[in-house]
Amino acid sequence: MQFMLLFSRQGKLRLQKWYEAHPDKVKKKITRELISTILARKPKMSSFLEWKDLKIVYKRYASLYFCCAIEQQDNELLTLEVIHRYVELLDKYFGSVCELDIIFNFEKAYFMLDELMVGGEVCETSKKNVLKAIAAQDLLQEVSYGDTAYEL
Amino acid sequence: MPAVRGDGMRGLAVFISDIRNCKSKEAEVKRINKELANIRSKFKGDKTLDGYQKKKYVCKLLFIFLLGHDIDFGHMEAVNLLSSNKYTEKQIGYLFISVLVNTNSDLIKLIVQSIKNDLGSRNPVHVNLALQCIANIGSKEMADAFGSDIPKLLVSGETMDVVKQSAALCLLRLFRTTQEIIPGGEWTSRIIHLLNDQHMGVVTAACSLIEALVKKNPDEYKGCVSLAVSRLSRIVTASYTDLQDYTYYFVPAPWLSVKLLRLLQHYPPPDDPGVRGRLNECLDTILNKAQEPPKSKKVQHSNAKNAVLFEAISIIIHSDSEPNLLVRACNQLGQFLSHRETNLRYLALETMCLLATSEFSHEAVKKHQETVINALKTERDVSVRQRAVDLLYAMCDRSNAEEIVQEMLNYLETADYSIREEMVLKVAILAEKYAQDYTWYVDVILNLIRIAGDYVSEEVWYRVIQIVVNREDVQGYAAKTVFEALQAPACHENMVKVGGYILGEFGNLIAGDTRSAPAVQFQLLHSKYHLCSAATRALLLTTYIKFINLFPEIKSQIQDVLKSNSNLRSSDAELQQRASEYLHLSVTTTTDVLATVLEEMPPFTEKESSILAVLKKKSGRMSAQEAQREARVQAREGNAAPATEKAQNAQLKTKPSSNAAFPIPQLNNSTSADLLGLSTPPATQNSIQSNTGVLVDVLGDLYGGGGTNTHNGTTTPASLSMSGATDNIKKFVCKNNGVLYENDIIQIGIKSEFRQNLGRIGVFYGNKTSMPLQAFNPTVSVGPGQQGKVTVQVKPVEPSIDAGAQVQQLVNCECIEDFNGLPDLTVGFTYGNVPQRLALHLPLSCNKFFEPTDMNGESFFARWKNLSGPLQEAQKIFKATGPMETASIKTKLLGFGMQLLEGIDPNPENFVCAAIIHTRTQQIGCLLRLEPNRQAEMYRLTIRASKESTAQILADLLAEQF
């Protein structure tokens, strides 16, 4: 996978993860192009499209679009399920996840994605194992901060 | 504001809320700028910030960046966070680095130490954080710094599984930037054996790594094949309960299955019959499961199951060796073609394109033609329709071409604008490739222009012209059809271009019919003239001047147009120039010269259809598909070679000419003989016979009928398409370029140029068949007449010529003294295991080293008298074998290489010429007088030369030409 983008129905980017290095300018251009292309598509259309020499796989969950760019030889259907697994993980962690959870806890969404995928490849497909890893991280946080209160 | 998990950063949440509450973009920018100023002052301030505050501000910067604003500070604070002993601070530091740091940043050096520390940590959570960060950056610096640690981490027995997973993929990411990072030797086997690991997650991650390694070095890693097959076998036969959390919606380990199948596609089918059998069993089982009723109604179940199925089909196509599996795969995809899930229809169409290229399943794919055509008409998603077009293109062959092309033309009328151009290219390619009858091809292309003129690129209309020019049998039909098409009141400009070109060349073929009489043709074209762009007008002006040659009766009408102010004083320089040059050409030159200048275009040469190249360039997907298709087709035709179409194509391909798509006579560079040094490659538009340098040769006929076909373009290049062998060697005395020899197997063309006593001859060997010519060995040797008098140096050529291909051989030669006869050219090769040998001659005669010499009558006669020795003169009296026309006689004499001296002989019917032969040792002055006697149909030829023996040689050569 080359990159993953999360954006809202209004076209606002909520999360971006790049597995190939691009200059910021290029990233912005790609993002703009893809958001407008995908938002223009109708619900019954296929989830796949050709884009430059990449394949785009996208799916909408409530108000959020999840969009992945994969290479020619990659499997489209399974990429849809990578997206679904990611949504399941977010859902489990936040408890019926909504767009706001991802806005306010964007860093968590990133940490979760890093457990699921590394370097653009699926790393751990077991839901249980990913959640275990995230729980281990949260535990470390609570150990460090359990007794401290901070002001703004 | 929703609850914040874990250790919430209240300040961050408040800031995010503020941003969300902004009513306008301006308000948001204002709020952000305020926050940026605040953070900047905090970071610059004297008060040292504690870890939490640093984390909070870094996190705010990250948020601002993700909103699409540029962030140019805060990097140092983030780097500081990496070494925090609080995990949450460290984690935010890493996140900032991963998201914001570009691979080439100077910061990389600063973070290496922190990452090293975490990589060495006892806590697997820290190690993973470091690995994920390395993978996120993935730069060469990272590879240099950690290239030795990570492989150790990957195979060490002490490493925990979660760390191994990240290590495998981290290594993969670094391998992509720095291939040397993977140690070879014993590591290979240790990495391969990760496929046997107990932990499914480790196997999944390792499989991606191994696939990348295999891609680079398949031999070293070929041990993975049997391991991958047995792992796959275990998964495929497992019940969905066996794999616990690695079962996804009742599908056992779909990710690992897909990765294993992908890995195996880098190898041919396994040699070991056991392994091969087991793999086929797996594929069989996967195909069987596709027929079972679903275990769940959820789309996740069907997606995961079908993801594995498509990957299995992909490997079946890749191996292309199991007819049974290929046909089953095709039937399965056929079912998907009418599935209610758009995604499945999309993928089925896409995958079938590949199946169509396999000889085992091509016919099975064709059974679904109707469904695919239907998809073109009913699919609501343009990307699915696009796939249907691709599939129709892929399944097209001789048997269904007319139907498919017709359906594509029908669809084109309503097709989405985004895919029209590609469709036009595809239709044009199919029509050309499968044309059994070129009238059909012409119809298809004209239809394309009519339906989608705006999307017909230059390559497409250039191509139809190339084909019409090269194929005599279709020229009359093409002229008639374009004439009819131009009758339409609204006519696309591309139609005017094609019409203009074709009528200019072949309008005479339909001029006999009063409905398309010359004046009617001209008026029809000219009625479009003022609606066209300058480029098209320029083309039409060329058509008009060609009309003057074809139809002298409308000359004055055309001259009026050329004279008109809108042309002669056009603001467009090109139009102005053409109008005035063409006008002068029509006024000042004799009909003979005009006929020569405006002669019919010689055939085009072509390696590959330029349209195909455009299509390939258009999309990566197409070029991959084409490559596979080509490879398959070649493999197929290597075994059995039917395909007359190949031979036809080959014939089109091998004619050694060199015209641009629409060469236009540029009068102002007509005397460019001096531009041509011997270093110029022979095949260029401007390669003029160096010893003449007049316009005639720029446009001169390169083939066939020699210099005789100057009349109204009705005599077309002769006998090229005849079967049986033609040896044109005699014609080469008076010309330098053309087809030397041709039979059903091979065409040999010549392009030569000479200067002073040196010459270079390009011999082009074109294979007209669909099989390669093997043991190809052409040799040149000088005979007794030339021994020691002329040298030839032959560049060697490859010993085989591919089907339809052409190779060039260069022969450099030098004239040492005057010589008799021609060197031998022997061409040996085997065709279909039958050795062939052609005994020919190289068109290298003494007159090739002529330099034309101009002189006045006085000096001509003085020299003539001087050369009065008995052996200095040779005279021949012979009967004319062809028509005794002035123009053709002149052309031959010019082609012979001598300067034609006009107005010198008291009898205007006679011709006198002068030239010098350059040899290494001396220059030989030569004079010629040719006296035709039209009543008796006889010629008397007298040649005088300064060297004894030369006159006789020249007289023998030339006498055979009339």
Image (cartoon, coloured by chain):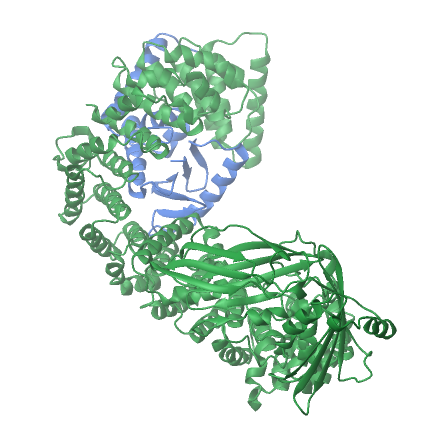
Chain colours: A blue, B green
User: From what the image shows, is residue B483 above or below residue B741?
Assistant: below
Q: Residue B423: name its quadrant.
A: bottom left
Provide residue B918's location: percent of width, then percent of height.
72, 59
State the quadrant of the C terminus of chain B.
Answer: bottom right
Residue A13: tell me if it is visible: yes
The answer to which of A49 and B677 lies nearer the viewer is B677
Rendered-image quadrant of the N terminus of chain B: top left
Q: Is residue B910 left or right of residue B23?
A: right
Q: Position of residue B797 (x, y in %)?
A: 49, 51
On screen, residue B880 above or below A64: below
Q: Nearer the viewer, residue B751 or B916?
A: B916
Query: In the image, residue B955 lies at what x, y percent?
Result: 67, 73
Question: Residue reaching furthest right?
Answer: B858
Q: Quadrant of residue B709?
A: bottom right
Residue B10 at least partly seen: no
Q: Is residue B870 left or right of residue A109?
A: right
The quarter holding residue A135 reads top left
Residue at 42%, 38% in the rendered image: A7
The residue located at (32%, 61%) in the rendering is B641
**Image spot of residue B220 (x, y percent):** 31, 29
Q: Residue at 64% across / 86% down in the picture?
A: B519
